[in-house]
Amino acid sequence: MTAPARPPLIGRTAELRSLAELFEAARAGTPGVALVCGEAGVGKSRLVAELVARAERSGAVVLAGAAVDVGESPPLLPLTLAVRALAREPAGRAIVEPWRGELEALGLLPPSPGGTGQAAPHHLDTAGRVLLGLAADRPVLLVVEDVQWADRATRDLLSYLTAIMLDARLLVVVTHREGGGSPGLDELGLGGLRRHPRVRGISLGPLDRTAIAELVAREPLPATDVEDPVELVWQRSRGNAFIAEETVRALRDRDPMAVSGTLRDLVLGRVRALPEDARTVVRALSVAEGAVSHELAQLVTGLPPDRLLTAVRHVVEEGSVVLDGPGAEGGDDGYRLRHGLAVDVVSADLLPAERRDLHRRYAAALAELTAGGDRSAVAALLAHHWDRAGDDVRALSAAADAASAAERVHGYADAYRHWRRVADLVAGRSVPARPAPQPVVAVGLDRPVSLERAAEAAHLAGEHDAAVNVLQERIGLTDPADPRRATLVARLGDYLLAAGRGVEAEGAYREALRLGGEAHVALLAGHAEALQAAGRFADARDEATRALAAARRAGSPDEQARVLVTLGFSLAYLEDTQAGAAALAEGLRVAEASGSPTVLGSAYHRRAELLSGPLNALSEGIDLALAGAERLTELGLGRTHGVRLLALAANGQFRCGRWDEAVEVIDQAFRARPSGSEALDIRLSRGRMRVGRGDLSGAAEDLDAVAMLAHDTVGARYRVPLLTLRAGLDMFLGRPERAVEHTVAGLDVVGKGHDDVWLEAPLIWHGLRAHAETVRLDRPPPADDVVDRLRESGTGLHDRARRAVPMVAGLVGVFAQMCDAEVTRADGDSDPELWGEVAAQWRRRDQPYNVAYGQLRRAEALLARRTRSRAAAEALVEAHDIAADLRAVPFLEEVRDLGRRARIRLPDLPPVPEPAGFPAPDAGAEPVPEDVEVARPARPRVPPARPPTRRDVLGSLTPRETEVLAEIAAGHTNREIAQRLFISEKTVGIHVTHLLAKLGVRSRVQAGAVYLRAATSETHPGS
């Protein structure tokens, strides 16, 4: 059946242009996301349909699907509908055929005869790989409509695609209904989309009166008693496109309901005017909540085939029903009501018995169509319809089927909601434990088991607080004498630990130990881990010692390895680093012998993390991490533990200056297509590397991806490094005020019970560094209480370092010195001796990037005091050489800027090209030692000072006078100019007197204006 021609789009020229621009950019290799928002009926679907038509005409692959409001839909339902619609046509089948295996594994296509039916282990990675693979051959337009009803897997996929699309020829268009009780983007976990640089928000407001007039005039109206049809439509619709179109259609049909008033009357009036069979179709579709195949519609309506075809053709041509893709159960055609408002109005008009009967018909028809086959795609719909039909037994079984179907594709968030529904059904109704004659799910459907399954699904989905709440509800149903109570309470400890609630987790483990139980060794091991997570390293050591003895008595190598890792990490943070390292090494050996790859991965990770991080044994930690990654890859865990170890290795290589190797390791990790927490680890590593190398836009993309993909991750492990890197990025972007904000946010995180001084020290230094930069750049300073908090945190690092293990104390102590030095810099009296000690300390610890920073600040401090110019030059040259070797572009620019202002010549380098020639110093310059080369004139911020290149108004000035004039134009006082150019205030005054006379002006304001006009003329000749 061919859809009728679409009338021209009215009133959305700008919005359609925006979508068309995004699509053309995607075709050229700049992907994007369009977020189209507006109230129900405003015209989102109509706008997107116009873009879809254009994309199809251009030859692009179009995947368009909509979410449905059924409470819990199958995972990736919109993509399922889109893929199956594309595969219906021969050309579409050819496009998806190379990806059939992946699409079947995801459940997006029905299994092929003889197929394995094996589920995809990582649905986000697999779906993303398929979509990016399609986009490699031709442009792809992916449309997800009504995201407010989308399942969690679909929402996660949207965030994931936004983060990974890079240069794919892909445009993603998402529509979101605002108002009317629909969840907002933040509630959906998509709030980060609005802030991502790839996302363009398109907000659809009501049509204006001009557009309404154009809509009314589109086709001639018959003569009626309405004096002003435009005013009538405008008053009735107030710009709502749906109401306006329905009113115009009613006027065209001479429907008196267009005069009487409400939308409900209008919609119901049109439905009641339909032939009986057409009314039957519309009423049936009003409870479907999604596209309905022709076969399903026939079973639900009970109409004979010829009458159903006649009725469907009538409502399609009349406009109440539109053609859509196939339903979840398959089929060739798909029908749905034109607007969600019509669904609400028509379904509300049904009698309760009529509504229940239609839901029963749908459920029975879906069951019949999928009998003997895979029901995973319709399980959620079956649960919905049986529930609305009042059939508790079948609703319960279908909800359990839906939960298991979600688990098979790792849709744990959806599985959690399904199991939660099962538990609620059992609680509210009397249901047999196995209601279906041949149950698909081999579990007892009692409330305790359902709650346990719901809690575990929530935990795996990262919804740790929900897991805690559900499991607490489950424990509340347990008799105090039940021997399983200890196991459940211990699992509660695991969930609390994952939620970052270490103190509560420790209490749960302690309670589980009091209760006893079969898993005594596991409880001790979990308790030790909780104590360590809470920062109670001594208690963790003691508990791990007990657990180790119990594990050895029980002969459990897995638990022995787990406990040894905890014991070793705790010992290393106390006063026995050697004993801690020995315990970690033993843990590795036991884990290797136990044959458990996950335990082995944890052992490698914790030992390498300790060595390459707080203990600063960089080479040993890097080698161990690389060896562990290779070993875990052999065991099939390269995408998880292997990637995590590669991220640790790259971080260590960054610290010790092996940046090229770090880039190679990061690339290796990304080739494994990591997901989950491992993707966060390696993106943080790449973000750090990109900040250092100067790929600031790429770094911003990585950090945005971490922020989006982390979802509700609780705790400091990701948030503090993320905020620290954001602070560093904003420093290089010239936004120290924002860097201070990131630091304060990070302090708020670590203030919530976390006490990892190694994690916190770099954050505090970044905040004090940012404060010093606001002073240097004459920016508004942070609030006094913020400055006080930063300085108190920096001072507190000294005390915390003294309480740590000596190796950790030394490293944290250097950060404390850096904080002290930044305070002197912010106070206007930067201490060169302190900065020199900072550089020396980092040199002893083999961290060249930090050595260079210390030497830069030492040179700056010496020059500001106008003493020891030779020492300042030597420090600056060392900083320059290190930065050049690392290719640390943003930092190198800072070094060279200081060299320009101080007139210290530095070698030309390809990363930062310099103009040829270095003018000699003018007579007014400060004396410089003969062995310090002199650079070209200093370059203030905006506009830059430059040697005269033509005989213009500035041609009579010396190079130093030109520099001073540029500073005057930038608004600096004589004192500030002296500080920036490292000359005396008296010398500045002499230069000012000379340049005013040469320019023939009487004031600094006039002189600045002359400079700005000359600079503009040089940049834009003829202006």
Image (tube, rainbow, N blue to C red):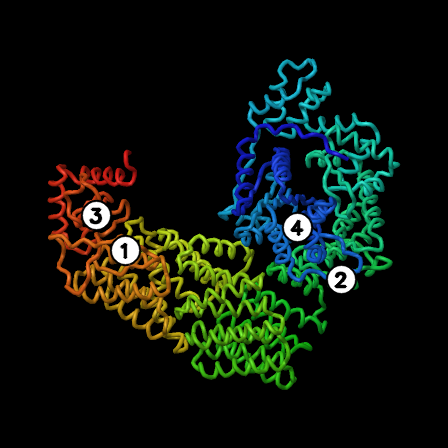
Dot 3 amino acid type:
Pro
Return the disc, 4 or 1, that comes first in the chain's sequence.
4
Res 151 label: 4
Res 529 label: none
Q: Is residue 632 visible?
A: yes
Q: Residues within 10 Å of mark 1 (few under 14, many from 20)?
A: some
Return the disc, 2 or 4, that comes first in the chain's sequence.
2
Return the disc, 3 or 4, that comes first in the chain's sequence.
4
Residue 716 placement, left or right of 368: left
Residue receiving disc 2: 116
Indicate the position of residue 203 as horizontal and vertical percent values: 54, 37
> Which residue occupies 11% across, 53% down?
923
Residue receiving disc 1: 897
Residue receiving disc 3: 947
Return the disc, 1 or 2, that comes first in the chain's sequence.
2
Q: Is residue 740 visible?
A: no
- Quadrant housing residue 965: top left
Indicate the position of residue 679 as horizontal and vertical percent values: 55, 61
Count of numbered marks? 4
Question: Which type of secondary structure does the marked residue at label 2 adopt?
Answer: loop
What separation in Å lies between label 3 and label 4 (alpha carbons)? 63 Å
What separation in Å lies between label 2 and label 4 (alpha carbons)? 26 Å
